[in-house]
Image (cartoon, grey):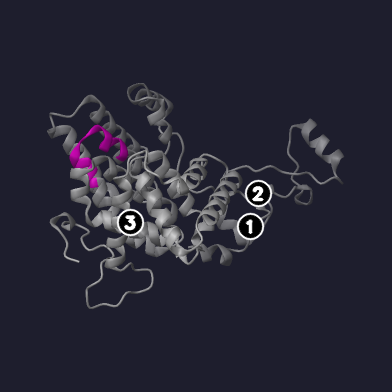
Amino acid sequence: MEKSASGSGRGRGWMRLNNSEAARPGVVATSEIENSMDKITMYLNLDETSDCSQYSKLIEAIEQIDTNDDSIILSRKVKQVKKVWLQLCKNGNEVSDSFFYVYSKCLSDTSLATKFVAVISLPPFDRVLHEQKLVVLLVKCLQYHYDERIALQKDHPEAFRSFVQMMGEFFHKAKGRSNSIDRLLREPNLVCLEMLLTSAQEADLCVFTTLLNLIASSEPKTVTSLLTHVRELLIKESNLTTTSKTWLLLALDLAHCRFGLLPNDIHKFYEDKLGENEMSNFQTTHSSLCIEILQPNKTFDSYKSSVNVLQVTPESAPLEQTNSQNNGQPSTDPKRLGRPILGVGVRDQSTWDKWE
């Protein structure tokens, strides 16, 4: 397919095959992308009264997702989405058609976009629905919009922001499982963050700072050039609004804190300027949870941390537990140490490596 000028620049040709090359597993053919985008464009042009009621239950199921839920509740909700999806779609064509419909809605609804990415990134959707792998369908959509990113930002800035948000959140959630995700999306993410920064619009800088915090928490060395650009904007750009300047300053403060939690006084400062809702995205860290294994075990020595876990005292030693509490000193007898509840499901390191 002949590419327009919108596909030029750094990162050009992401996932693109030469015409002479045969399609490899996991790579989407150009003709398939064109057909998919025709469907997405059609759905984008539908007004609210158009009849797409066959997918309304799927949208409702996805809306129930809350990324702040604990893993058990979130897993149950995702399984419910899968159940509804299979009930609505009887074959692969219907699965892909419904996927493109939901994706088109995500381009105008950032909340739905976050929930949709969470659904696809969780383990139940590593598999297929009627021979359609949802991860591949998402990459197909992201590939097209990345190639057309300049035109998309110019003509549909809201859709562009949603696209960049979905790509950044998917990169953050899924890259740990597959090196291919890291290779595919690292450069496109940086390119699109640069585009958001260059526009210097308030809404774009909000998405920029939020995604910068999300991505840089695990990739701090890759954002040096972006932070330099932030400083240059603050120095040279005289037309920045107060809110735009605040988002840029927040990006620098996050970098100063190594993209961890902000000190309480600084967080309160930005909360007063930007609002509680906007700053809720910066109240938690995005690193993985580490669990301390208190019982001696050489296999897990390298995974120890300072996190305390609930201990269960054996029933055979109630007297010793009482004495220990009365003396104000914890028992040091290894035979009397309870097992860590969170360690029950831990397996050896060779099993963990399968997810890398």
Q: Main secondary structure of the magenta part?
A: helix
In the rendered structure, find residue 342 and report the number of the disc placed on it. Answer: 2
Depth check, front residue: 269 or 171: 171
Closest to the camera, between mark 3 and mark 1, is: 3
Q: CA distance from mark 3 to mark 1?
A: 37 Å
Marks 1 and 2 close (CB-CB < 8 Å): yes
Closest to the camera, between mark 2 and mark 3, is: 3
- Give amino acid for label 2: Leu
Q: Secondary structure at mark 1?
A: loop
- For the image, the number of numbered tags is 3
Q: Which residue is mark 3?
A: 141
**Is 11 situated left or right of 57 in this image?**
left
In the rendered structure, find residue 346 and report the number of the disc placed on it. Answer: 1
Residue occupying the point 29% across, 41% down: 208
Residue bounds of the magenta highlight: 194-207
Question: Could you say where residue 154 lies in the image, as x and y percent from the top left?
Answer: 18, 44
Marks 2 and 3 close (CB-CB < 8 Å): no
Rendered image quadrant of residue 325: top right
Residue occupying the point 42% across, 42% down: 112
